[in-house]
Amino acid sequence: MSNEEARNNGPHRITVSPWPTEPLRPTMANVEDRRPGLGLSSRGLERDGVPFVPISGELHYSRIPRHRWEARLRSTVAGGVTTVSTYVPWLHHVPERGEPRFDGNLDVGAFIDACGNHRLDVVLRIGPWCHGELRNGGFPDWVAAADVEHRTDDPKYLELVEEWFGQLAGHLGRRAGPDGVLLAIQLENELYDQPGHLRTLKTMARQAGLAAPLWTATAWGGAQLPADEVFPLYGGYADGFWVDSEAGWDPTFREHFFFSHTWDDPGIGADLRHSELTAPADPTAAGFPPATCELGGGMATAYHRRPVLAPLDIATVAFCKIGNGSAWQGYYMYAGGTNPPGGLQESHASGYPNDLPRLSYDFHAPIGEAGEINGSHAELRRQHAFLTAFGAGLAELPSWLPEVRPADAHDRTTPRWAVRSDGTKGYLFLAWHQPYDQLDPLPDVQFEIAGTTVPSEPITVQPGTLACWPFFQEYGGIQIEWITATPITLLDGPDAPVLVLLADHSVPVELQLPNERPTKLTPSEHPVRLLSATGALDLLVLPAALGPDLWVREHPERTLLISGCEISWYGEDPVQVVAAGTAPQLRRYDPADRRFVEVPVNAAQARAATAKVDLIRPAADVPATYGERDGRASSPKRSDIDRLAARYRITLPDWVADVGEGRLRITWAGDVAELEVDGTTVADRFWDGTVWTVDLQDAGLAAATDVVLHVLPLSPDSRVWLASEARPTRTPEVLVEELAVG
């Protein structure tokens, strides 16, 4: 049946049933490397017999000042993340052979301890090669220069690795031992054709004293992995810097905006892959569930290609993976950072196909380089709250795809949907959004699952819709046949539990109870009480406009919060509120009073002002190119910036020196910018159309005597690719529109 015929033949259909087979249990975490209470099967992970869905976010401790670890972890917890993953870059720790460093922000052991204090699991990605847009892929220069066959079982190379693993294990001690605290250890990264070497690395890590219940490896690109030895993890990005500037929106990115049971992504790392692709393996065949470690939390900015993704772009990819059956949601990156000085980034000069900024690794992540909370944080944290509240049940539901699916990655007329169901209950997932090539409204949409039709009448699905509708679910003894609103969390109440849902984008809210007619509900901040002979339930359907302001705190008890400010918390301490230029506000839902109540906030309104900007020297004429490698434009050298960039002296308000904490937001346009404090470059940026945020304290601005901004214009003839939002300002002029401090 064609897609057009399907649309003309009534509701779109999915056939659902129980799992076709019993779960498989690998030896990993069940026989070998067992930890009390932790289990693993082809359906997912379990704690004390209860399924759960890990939510991991990548934070690089060595790219974040140590005094900022706590703040980043608080913001991570506030985003609903349950696990921190991090590379352990050999390059950062052992720049000189025989002189390992684990001091300051290189104290990975202290970072693991800090994560534990926040109830966060930890995944260490120990390499030896890790990529991460690092020079030499994370190898120290002396390793990269060694006369060995890197990333193989060459004995001379293994001697170097043994030394590194021993140094790391010695530092971590019992944290990474057989009774340690790690959830997982990742071996290597994007190694496609050396399964034997991965097995060797695992043996060596164990011999060094490193242990975890889970041993993982990246599986994209048709990676050949040693059977039963590593847990294959996948990825998915909405766009990437690693394709050519003229490539457009590659199909490997497009495909993540559709529901599918294909987990491999041949695009990730393709610019560095030299082996032939092999047919992707089915992770469940070896007893492992489909799982991810690199869903794009944003995207890095390369010189030749500078993608900027909207929060909904990020959220749609993650949402589709949940509908596909993901047993582990892992993001790269979740918090941005700053490279140590010394040119330790991936670059043409170090033999890589991409030039990255020398310092900035902001990644447009949910938590920015300066610690700011970005829009993707809100879009993702609602999904995370759902997974935490309902993950135990969701993990028991297989994923099913419709009878009629989109024809290809360019299909714009077929609904994109999937169902998680065991044949008796489930969730319907609907996604109608993608970047760049915007979708049109989709008319006459209605679905049929397990003998029920939802909604009661066909609707028009508007672009930007992400909807998750529960069907045949029971809450508090109340049976709900279906409801067209997305569940966020479930709160305990003195008289009845509170099912919190969010109205979806332009979708009317309908509630279908057994043996009753569908009821239309008006979203509000006040619940509807449902009663039956078997139970009671408060149904709180919030307006879609409140979505960006919703937060769910899980400890010491699950609490629903509303705030338009940046908020975070630690343990059982009061919520910390950061209000930039606005009065701090925070509300909490009280299940007993069945309403939102104001929460007193002990925080002063942040001061805000505009910095003074004086032109020191105008920019000179700039060339169309500064060179290239493999057809990709090279970034200007520091000497080019010194010769050609405009220079501005920045004068900050006097009170900045007193408050210490704050951020400088730079609204600008050009090509490349560098911020210099008392003669030292402390921050840099490639222009991509977004506001540049710098932490006042970390950049040394609060105590600075001389702050100079260097801005290099972008030639109109440059081959650099920019997002459409940035293209109107693609002129040879330098623009510094505003520097806001607050």
Image (tube, rainbow, N blue to C red):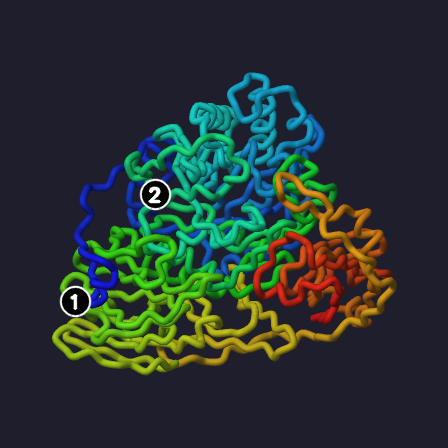
Camera-nearest residue between 12 and 380: 12
Q: Secondary structure at mark 2?
A: loop
Give coordinates of residue 285: x percent, y percent: 28, 36
Q: Relative to 204, is 114 above or below?
A: below
Q: Quadrant of residue 602?
A: bottom right
Estimate the spatial distance between the alpha carbons at disc 1 and disc 2, rounded to whole Å. 38 Å
Q: Relative to 250, is 22 above or below?
A: above
Q: Is residue 385 left or right of residue 668?
A: left
Q: Categorize mark 2 by other alpha carbons within 10 Å: few (<14), some (14-19), many (20+).
A: few
Q: Quadrant of residue 708?
A: bottom right
Task: Identify the residue at horizontal 80%, vertical 49% (top origin).
Answer: 640
Q: Which residue carries the number 1 mark? A: 452
Task: Identify the residue at horizontal 42%, vertical 64% (top origin).
Answer: 382
Q: Categorize mark 1 by other alpha carbons within 10 Å: few (<14), some (14-19), many (20+).
A: few
Camera-nearest residue between 479 and 648: 648
Q: Is residue 652 left or right of residue 667?
A: right
Q: Is residue 105 left or right of residue 532?
A: right
Q: Is residue 120 visible?
A: no
Q: Which residue carries the number 2 mark? A: 37
Q: Is residue 87 visible?
A: yes
Give coordinates of residue 420: x percent, y percent: 26, 56
**Image quarter in which the N terminus is found:** bottom left
